[in-house]
Image (cartoon, helix red, strand yellow):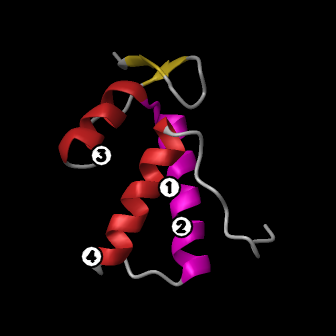
């Protein structure tokens, strides 16, 4: 039986994630408060950020940036799209 969460992004009860998708406290907050649908929205947004800014997720600086954007996306009022993004 799927787990239900009150999704912070969609602002409705929805199916929760099957596992913690990110390590640490942020991952725990995401697991407890983010739905599968909202997580998919983040993955699409993250892919756009990686492509537009030509980030390499293996670089610590890029990972730190993406982690900050992830926190803003779910818990801080949203992550901004790059200024030149047309999509």
Residue 17 part of the magenta-drawn span: no
Mark 1 and mark 3: span between their CA atoms? 11 Å
CA–CA distance in space, label 4 to label 1: 19 Å
Residue that extends furthest to the right in the rendered view of this protein: 86
Number of callouts in the render?
4
Query: On residue 21, which mark appears?
Result: 3
Within the image, what quadrant is residue 27 found in?
top left
On the image, which quarter does residue 78 sit in? top right
> Mark 2, mark 4: which one is toward the viewer?
4
Which secondary structure lies at badge 4? Answer: helix
Element under disc 3: loop
- Give yes or no for contact between labels 1 and 2 (Cβ–Cβ under 8 Å): yes
Residue 20 appears in the rendering: no
Q: Secondary structure at mark 1?
A: helix
Query: In the rendered view, does 71 fall on the left or right side of 76?
Result: left
Disc 3 versus disc 4: nearer the observer: 4
Q: CA distance from mark 2 to mark 4?
A: 17 Å
Secondary structure mainly formed by the magenta segment: helix
The picture quadrant where one finds residue 34 is: top left
Residue at (22%, 39%) from the top-left corner? 25
Q: Position of residue 26 (x, y in %)?
A: 29, 42
Q: Which residues are magenta?
A: 34-53
Looking at marks 1 and 3 on the same chain, the residue that comes earlier in the sequence is marked by 3
**Residue most extreme to the front:** 76
Mark sitting on residue 43: 1
Read off the residue under disc 2. Answer: 47
The tag earlier along the polypeptide, 3 or 2, is 3
Magenta stretch encompasses residue 36: yes
In 3D space, how far apart are the residues under numbered discs 3 and 2 (Cα atoms)?
Answer: 16 Å
Near-viewer residue (57 or 40): 57
Question: Which residue position is annotated with label 4?
Answer: 60
């Amino acid at each position: 039986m799927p787990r239900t969460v009150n999704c912070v992004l969609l602002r409705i009860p929805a199916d929760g994630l099957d596992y913690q998708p990110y390590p640490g406290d942020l991952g725990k907050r995401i697991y407890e408060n983010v739905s599968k649908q909202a997580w998919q929205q983040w993955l699409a947004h993250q892919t756009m950020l990686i492509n537009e800014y030509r980030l390499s997720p293996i670089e610590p600086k890029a990972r730190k940036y993406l982690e900050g954007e992830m926190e803003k996306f779910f818990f801080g009022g949203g992550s901004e799209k790059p200024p030149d993004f047309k999509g």
